[in-house]
Image: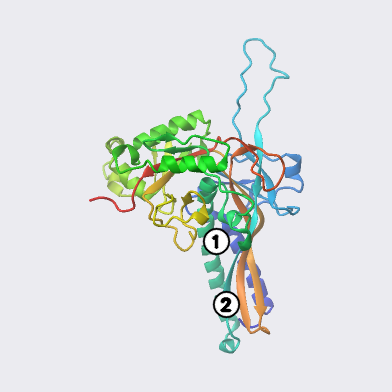
Amino acid sequence: MGLLNDSLKAYRALLKKEMAAAQWYQIPVWAPMIGHIGGTDGKYPRSVPFGATKARTLKPTTKAIEVLTDFYHGGGWTMDIPIAYPLTEDPIYGDNPALGNEEHRKWAYNQAIINQLRKPVLTRDGMMGELALTPKMVAQIMENAKDELIDFNKRWQAYAPYDALTRGYSQNILAPQSAGGFGNILLQKSHPNMFVAGYGQVPWTNTPAAYEANVVTAVNTLANNDTDRFSTKVIKNAKVYASQLRIQPTQVGPYTCHVMIIHEAQAVQLFDDEEFKHTMTSLITKDGQGSPLFTGVVGAYLYLGVLILVDSNAPGIWTSGDTSYNSAYGTVNYGNPHPTANPLMNSDRKIAFLIGQSAVMCGMARALSFASETWDYENKKSEASNTTVGFNRSDITDNDGLFGTAGLFKENTSSLEVVTYSPNSPSW
């Protein structure tokens, strides 16, 4: 790409700052639900003070995704991230002394795993074709590469929370060791709070293989009938179970509520639900702008205190016997193995995610930035985005302190999943 003079070096530094800012504030669906532990400096997350995680002085934001930025991270694959945990002890009755009997506010420090994520792009395959490039043209090439790399990482990070919720970890963590991940050490863990429409809760067991088999059994009961489709009844039941599981409402924009993310195929079924139509009819104004039945906007709306968000990239489930099932991706397949290329999936069984405070932990030890490589005697050049992050589901475990071991599961008080029969192709 020609010679980098002082002016272009400064321009490149500016592009790096733009990449770092875009990493969190342009993520589809999830951006309003991201909380930065330690706060932000304008558009940039602040790194927590050195030693803060070890001293246990950090507090969760109570947003759905807890992001801990620690540029002082002292090496290793794990970061300790605080997540919200509800108060559970009995109150003090009558004149019994409260002093000395205070319940400690429970910030459950969970161990989140992180891994490097790089995306290389070839920007020059030969010097002869660039002899006529001016510095302005070189700057434009760099700008284009920056935009493409930001777009790629936005799409990857928009899907990573789904991987964390359904599988326990984001894809860069569960990738095979040969691909730079920990997939040969860590096992996929289906959500412990999983429900199937028309069936109920999937029976929990601490034996991973047995629980995955229970998930398959429950999911395979789904059929094309009224009880198994997405409906207002699914939302009501999810609210009841959220209360039983002590899932606390989170903050999204002006709302303090539970959030439910559904696929657009589930939204189509919801629009056919008579109770939902009656409720939305009551919102109709003179011009119809108060109700999605008139506006056609299937994006975000409140129902029974649940903020419903619609995302066509939300994953579904494949089990053995399905056309696209691959045993290499676990007993249960969630979504597509390559979501940046093909986030839309053809499974007829979709997942509705009910989310509260601290549902997903995310550790970041390196902000998104440029890295360059020149080889073949400076004849070829590539640019790469580089970041070190990890998205983890906020299961609370009795951790034995050994990296790579599952620990004994205790509970999850931050999210649940409901699987419904919701085919991509609506019946006419």
Question: Please, is residue 343 above or below residue 149 in the view?
Answer: above
* Residue 132: % across, % down: 57, 89
Q: Does residue 294 appear left or right of residue 98 in this picture? A: left
Quadrant for the N terminus in the image: bottom right
Q: Is residue 31 visible?
A: no
At label 2, which amino acid type do we have?
A: Thr
Label 1 vs 2, first from the N-terminus: 2
Neighbour tally class for label 2: few under 14, some 14-19, many 20 plus, Cα within 10 Å = some
The one nearer the camera, 31 or 227, is 227
Query: Which label number is shown at residue 140?
Result: none
Q: Secondary structure at mark 1?
A: helix
Where does residue 226 sit, x and y in percent of width and height? 29, 38
Name the amino acid type tagged 1. Answer: Asn
The residue shown at (70%, 51%) is 70
The residues bearing labels 1 and 2 have C-alpha atoms spaced at a distance of 18 Å
Residue 414 visible somewhere in the drawing: yes
Give the residue drawn at x 64%, y 56%: 115
Residue on which disc 2 sits = 123
Residue identified by numbered label 1: 153
The part of the image, by quadrant, that contains residue 153 is bottom right
Q: Circle 2 sits in a helix, a strand or a loop, which is it?
A: strand
- Front-most of residues 185 and 29: 185
Q: Residue furthest top?
A: 95
Q: Is residue 138 left or right of residue 268?
A: right
Residue at position x 68%, y 85% in the image: 377
Q: Position of residue 328 (x, y in %)?
A: 52, 56
Residue drawn at x 61%, y 19% as measured from the top left = 90
Q: Quadrant of residue 385?
A: bottom right
